[in-house]
Amino acid sequence: MEPNQNAGLIDLIFQVPGRLVVTQWKFYRINYLQVGAGGNTPQAGADILRDYKLPEILQLKFVSSDQFHKGTVKSQVEKTDGPQLGDYVKSAYVQQLMGDQSLELRAHLVIIVGSRHILLWDMDKEGKLAAEPRLVEGPSRLDRQDG
């Protein structure tokens, strides 16, 4: 599988000296996540989500009306999104690029959660996800100007 032959599978693949970087990007929209007590507007849900830490984010559930995601954020990654990236990492195309040019692989699943958090989930060259993602930290809320 080369990029663009399977639409939506890989969003970015590039080479830097000695490395091949493969990323897949996902966006879990706030209106499809069960945040807080439920029945929140997207803005209220986003305000609640802002204070969530990694364990809480991983346990967020998708609403039943979401046609594309099921279970929790963590289970969605483990059952669907991670294996999708893993299949690409193990593909003949990626393996050939790594072997022909002796490149080290850096593979990442990048997940934007409700426009408030970014998860960076690493994957090894065998297509195995790290046990947990890293929560990408932005500027502190004291440093932000929220309008």
Image (tube, rainbow, N blue to C red):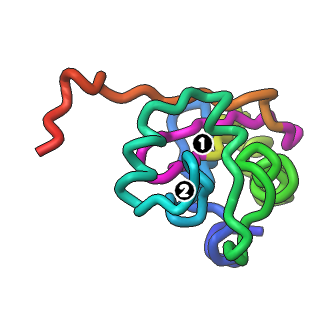
Between 58 and 98, which is closer to the camera in this rendering?
58
- Disc 1 marks which amino acid? Val
User: In the image, 15: left or right of 44?
Assistant: right
Residue 141 in the image: x percent, y percent?
27, 26
Residue 46 in the image: x percent, y percent?
41, 49
Query: Image quadrant for the N terminus?
Result: bottom right
- The crowd level at tag 2 (other Cα within 10 Å; few <14, some 14-19, many 20+) is few
Residue 42 in the image: x percent, y percent?
41, 61
Between 101 and 126, which is closer to the camera in this rendering?
126
Q: Residue at x 65, y 46 (%)?
A: 109
Query: Image quadrant for the C terminus?
Result: top left
Q: Which residue is drawn at 79% across and 42% down?
A: 99
Q: Is residue 73 visible?
A: yes
Q: Are marks 1 and 2 in contact (CB under 8 Å)?
A: yes
Gap between marks 1 and 2 measured at Cα: 8 Å
* Residue 21 tag number: 1
Between 128 and 94, which is closer to the camera in this rendering?
128
User: In the image, 36: left or right of 61?
Assistant: left
Name the residue tied to disc 2. Answer: 12
Mark earlier in primary sequence (1, 2)? 2
Secondary structure type for disc 2 = strand
Residue 114 in the image: x percent, y percent?
48, 53
- Disc 2 marks which amino acid? Leu
User: In the image, 73: left or right of 35?
Assistant: right
Residue 3: name its quadrant.
bottom right
